[in-house]
Image (cartoon, rainbow, N blue to C red):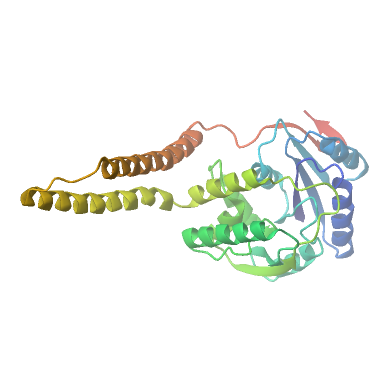
Amino acid sequence: MLSVIIPAYNEELSVERAYYTISEILQNAGIVNEIIFVDDGSTDRTYETIKALAEKEKNIHGLHFSRNFGKEAAISAGLASAQGDAVVVIDCDLQHPPEKIVEMYRRWEEGYEIVEGIKAARGKESRLYGFAAKQFYSIISALVGFDMSNASDFKLLDRKVVDILNRIPERKGFFRAISFWVGFRKTTVEFEVRERMEGETKWSAGGLLKYAVSNISAYSTAPMQIVTVLGVMMLIITAIFSVWALVDKIRGIALEGMTTVIIILIFIGSIMMISLGIIGYYVARIYDEIKGRPKYIVSSSCRSGEEVK
């Protein structure tokens, strides 16, 4: 059986289309399936739409979060609930082409344990967004050691991979990267990102920036090394000014100007504040992890028309 995980946040206009499109494609391909909708604390009627579908269909499992926990948490909840021998994650807006699921499934039948959906084209997006995305994936690829330049959440995972991901206790993971990290036999399927047919994107510029910073810090301590680099820079600058001051002292010439002193003090203070900020961010992540709070809270669920509170 194939489990299809569909995270949804304020997607009441997309839920039915996503279900019937995916269900028809899988049925025509002869693939037994279950479809898991994870409502990430939507403020519209997304979960009511999921429940209505579950009352009519037999292969739907719906989860509803008590609040918005984020897409990574929604994917984690779907993976924990999936019963299939293979699991696919796909966006509710169907910008990931659902017909590619069949191609992924066939590759899995060939023995591949992870089938990555790789973007052949990113679709319509602004130049600034495209540039920012390219830079982010360049950085994250360099940090994790894998080429993630066109990576996405659209992928198929074997049961053994899902079981391992479910055992990872990390609260703030990065699904796109962690599937590279676990290893296993991989292959790729290319797809072109489609335009959203209903609703609007849920990502803002600020949200994307926060997402990028969080994921970079989750997979690398490289930002911490910036503190060391800045410290070495300051040591070199201090040594230069010390030698300069010492030579002038020997020559009987006083070092001139308060401006130089003020600039140096501001420079040192700025580096110290940046360094403390970087260290503080990692300490905050450690604090979040050791609190041991759950990744998400499921307030209600439904399966085949029977709601469980």
* Residue at horizontal 88 percent and vertical 51 percent from the top: 17
Residue 170 lies, in percent from the top left, at 53, 43
The answer to whether residue 152 of the structure is visible from this angle is: no
Farthest-out residue, top = 309
Q: For the view shown, which residue lies furthest in the right direction?
A: 56
In the picture shown, does residue 219 fall above or below 258?
Answer: below
Q: Which residue is at a point 86% across and 54% down the rendered structure image?
A: 197
Is residue 110 visible to the viewer in this orientation of the structure? yes
**Residue 157 point in image, percent of width and height:** 66, 58
Measured from the top left, where is residue 136 in percent x and y?
Answer: 56, 57
Which residue is depicted at the point 29% across and 53% down? 233
51 vs 263, left or right, is right
Q: Quadrant of residue 283?
A: top left
As rendered, which of 204 and 27 lies closer to the eye? 204
Q: Is residue 88 left or right of residue 150?
A: right
Judged from this view, the residue extending furthest toward the bottom is 110
The image quadrant where one finds the C terminus is top right
Q: How many marks?
A: 0
Residue in the foreground of this view, choosing between 244 and 55: 244
Residue 12 x, y percent position in the rendering: 85, 41
Task: Say above or below: 286 vs 255.
Answer: above
Q: Quadrant of residue 64?
A: top right
Above or below 114: residue 73: above
- Seen in the picture, residue 231 relative to 108 is either above or below; the reply is above
Quarter in which the N terminus is drawn: bottom right
